[in-house]
Amino acid sequence: MTDADVRLVDMTLRDGMHAVDHQFTPEEMADVAAALEAAEMDVVEVSHGDGMGGSSINYGFSAATTEEYLDAVAPELDDTRLSVLMLPGIGTVEEIDMAIDRGADMCRIATHVTEADISEDHFTKVKDRGLEANGLLMLSHMAEPERVLEEAQLMEEYGADAVYVMDSAGALLPQDVRDRVGLLTEELDIEVGFHAHNNLGLGIGNTLAALDEGATTVDGCLRGLGAGSGNAQIEVLVGVLKKAGYDINPDFFGVMDAAEDVLVPMIDDDEMPELDNDSLILGYAGVYSSFLRHTRRAAEKYDLDPREILIELGDMEVVGGQEDLITDVASRLADESGAAAEAAGDD
């Protein structure tokens, strides 16, 4: 492929796995990958939604193993590069070797926005094997721009070829994106990327804001598939970038056809992302979508509005793995509500 102004990474077969409970089959992945190759997509990412090693009781079992997915997808890709996702603490460095041996061209290593220091061994492994390594700073709304820069500089020191600002909860506003991406592009000597979620309806707009500030690599999914209300819809993004005059590789009609003719027949209507009240409150509160189901249960148990619980969790800046706090928060809010009602009765 020729050099372009912007590199597009399609994550339908990774982040999109969240929308289908990680149940894409290897054959379905191969079909989507072939359509994206035909559409001249720059990069296709393949993994469990939570990265290699994510298939588990904690994060949900996928329909097949990472090995089976990579074996199905790799033969379908020629010019399009194959990426995998690694979350230290979920995946292991041994899985990096496995992915490389099965055709991966690059590995993206993701940590919480303040925990880049846990990724050094993983970057070392990827670089020792001669692959491109990108760093992803998840839930970037939870850190001020200066802290995001400090963590990005650690990843750069570890060998990252690019560092992403990830709006994992779809909580950033355009100016928030500009502040973070702009600072990174000014201070880093490597590429800067951006990953949007659409919980506030800003997936495309925020991606454009990131590009305005110098980002050169961005993510999306066919039909906007993904956690919460999904990611930036990549066929829309391709059309918008072409209309805006960006030089990009993917073919607009080809990406549209991959979405309409290949992906859509695989997806049930209830799996399509929707900007509903649930995803809206997740974006507003800045909380991962994994908290939603547990919050609903706690709200029913304690006779609360789940939105109140999620906003409180957002104020506490909870991250993935802290779902056990939901019951504590619900119990406390219920006690406070009861005490307030009792006090009002005394008046």
Image (tube, rainbow, N blue to C red):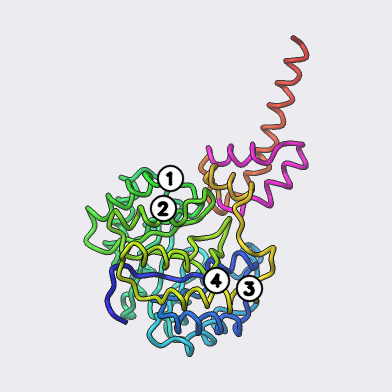
Q: Looking at the picture, which amino acid does disc 1 mark? A: Leu
Q: Looking at the picture, which amino acid does disc 4 mark? A: Gly
Residue in front for this viewpoint, 36 or 261: 261
The C terminus is located in which quarter?
A: top right
Mark 2–mark 1 contact, CB under 8 Å? Answer: yes
Side of 5 relative to 37 (left or right): left
Q: Earlier in the sequence, mark 3 or mark 4?
A: 4
Q: Earlier in the sequence, mark 2 or mark 3?
A: 3
State the residue at coordinates (30%, 57%): 154
Disc 3 packing (10 Å; few <14; some 14–19; many ≥20): many
Q: Earlier in the sequence, mark 4 or mark 2?
A: 4
Secondary structure character of the magenta stretch overall: helix
**The magenta stretch spans residue 38:** no
In the rendered image, residue 114, in percent from the top left (x then y), is placed at: 40, 50
Q: Earlier in the sequence, mark 3 or mark 1?
A: 3
Circle 4 residue: 53
Residue in front for this viewpoint, 41 or 44: 41
Circle 1 residue: 173
Mark 4–mark 1 contact, CB under 8 Å? Answer: no
Mark 3–mark 1 Cα distance, whole angstroms, equals 33 Å
Mark 3–mark 4 Cα distance, whole angstroms, equals 10 Å
State the residue at coordinates (28%, 64%): 191
Disc 1 packing (10 Å; few <14; some 14–19; many ≥20): some
Circle 3 residue: 62
Tell me the SS state at disc 2.
helix
Point out the stretch of residues depicted in magenta. Answer: 288-315
Mark closer to the observer (4, 2):
2
State the residue at coordinates (42%, 56%): 166
